[in-house]
Image (cartoon, helix red, strand yellow):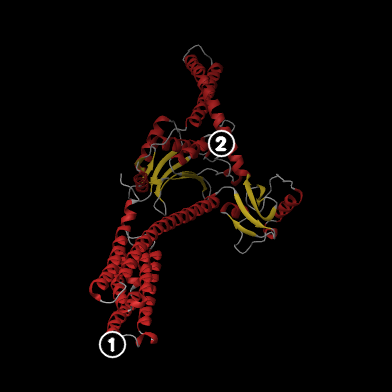
Amino acid sequence: MSNPALPQLNAPRPIPAAIRHEMLFFNGFRLMQALVYIGLAFAPAQIHGLSLESLRFALVVTLPYLLFAVAALALTRRCVPYAKAAVSIWLVVDIIAAVLALSAIDYSRIGIAMMLAVNLGVGALILSLRVSSFFAALATLGLLGRALFIQHGGGGGGGESSLLESALFGVAYFAITTLCHVLSRQLRASEALAEQRSTDLANLSQVNELIIRRMKTGVLLVDDANRIHQINESAWMLLGNPSAEQRDLGRLAPELSRRLYHWMTSGKLDETATQLADGVPEVVPRFSRLAPNDDSLVLIFLDDTSLVSRRAEELTLSSLGRLSASIAHEIRNPLAAIRYSAQLLAESESMDSADQRMVEIINNHCVRLNEIIENILQLSRRERSRPETLDLGRWAQSFVDEYKQGNDIGNDTLRVVVGGPTAVAALADPQQLQQVAWNLVQNALRYGRMPGEPARVIVIVRTGEHGEPILEVTDRGPGIAPKVATQIFEPFYTTHEYGTGLGLYLARQMAEANQASLEYVRVAGGGSCFRLVLTPAQMGRMAGEATGT
């Protein structure tokens, strides 16, 4: 596997702003450098000591260099994508201009040579060490060539001292370019690390904000003036969905404000549950200072008691499921023996009607007890769903036919209605879907009838407003009272003397295992409707492809 860092080194630099700033400084310094050259060449004190040819030579050297510096400064932004090539060209021009300026303005050779060191150093910030060393060597050769020319035929004295000065400046050029390049690498590494840390910090901040926003526990940040600074979604809902302008905790939740004041003054926490607004669950508030002995900012945590009760209920059901499953296995064998014995007794010809009635009661209670055991075993198994693409209309018709064959419904009616000419495709586990539908139909046939009338149950297959497949089991019975309807999906809740209260609870659990939702809908004019909204088959395939399954 290739190193992911290599493409970043070969690609354009990830920090063009730093490169642009360095190139702007480089070109700005060159413009000042050209102006200094002109000032040195045409200073009033020096014009009288120079010949006409020397003045012309100085003019030929400095004025084009000034125009080049202005053009380079104006084109800096366009040259940023080609920084290395542009800087290399600029350094070649700088070195040539500096050597010619040394020849034209000999009395300022030290100052000119020192300014050239700045050009080489800035270039080393952008170029590689090998290229920077090349330009340092080129500048050194230029100075040494000028010194040798003066010594061996250029006329004038001081050739030995110029040669020594050129050599010393060459050493300084190499040292400056090497030092600047090392500093540049360290700066680049520090900037990259700082940028990476900044990105990580921003991502971490977003993750923390998302976690706090999605927490089931309500979180508020309140200052010492009792004003809310931050609030997450759960706290907003537990406070009754207040408007964004409401920030005063005393007006928004007086009881919570009172408990906060009591905690800050006495240090004691009132752990009794309270309701902060109408129609919201009760909460238990907890308080924490952001800093020790500092009351300027306080975090308030609102624990939803319904969530705590639900977790306790889930733990209870899990423990009860394991215990009851072991008991159910032990009961099953003697129950089968009792039922078999009752069937043998029923076949006896010497039994009178009273004994036959007793045998019938035994069989009925054996059937009821077996249903309880099956429900308990389903509660303990909770098998993983294996979804398949189903033609919901055909599946519903097959289910109804199979149900009629296996159960004597008497005068009751059970039929299927498919809405629309097109097939309704759904993604679900056929076995678990059959268990859900069986529970719903069984309840509809048992409870969905008016007194003295047969039950009329319809299994409806249709497509929802947003294209989702829907399976509905409806009846024309008395319906379910609103107070009872809010509790029918709770485990062990039943209104029938022979019910277990597990049928609808298990149906909803299996629906959720198939990424479906089961809800009760009251029918206008009487009756009940249990609506199962399934996952579209096309959406399920897309989700499977996205997860690689």
On screen, 453 above or below 202?
A: above
Q: Is residue 478 left or right of residue 298?
A: left
Q: Residue, x 55% and y 25% (percent of image)?
A: 323
Q: Position of residue 243 (x, y in %)?
A: 60, 62
Identify residue for label 1: 52
Q: Is residue 253 left or right of residue 531?
A: right
Q: Quadrant of residue 93?
A: bottom left
On screen, 480 above or below 111?
A: above
The amino acid at mark 1 is: Leu
Question: Is residue 462 among the parts visible in the rendering?
Answer: yes
Disc 2 is placed on an element classified as helix
Label 1 Cα neighbours within 10 Å, binned few <14 / some 14-19 / many ≥20: few
Q: Position of residue 66 (x, y in %)?
A: 33, 79
Q: Is residue 50 left or right of residue 296?
A: left
The residue lying toward the viewer, choosing from 96 and 531, is: 96
Which numbered disc flags the more N-terminal residue, 2 or 1? 1
Report the residue that reaches farthest toward the left.
Answer: 153
On screen, 164 above or below 394?
A: below
Identify residue for label 2: 314
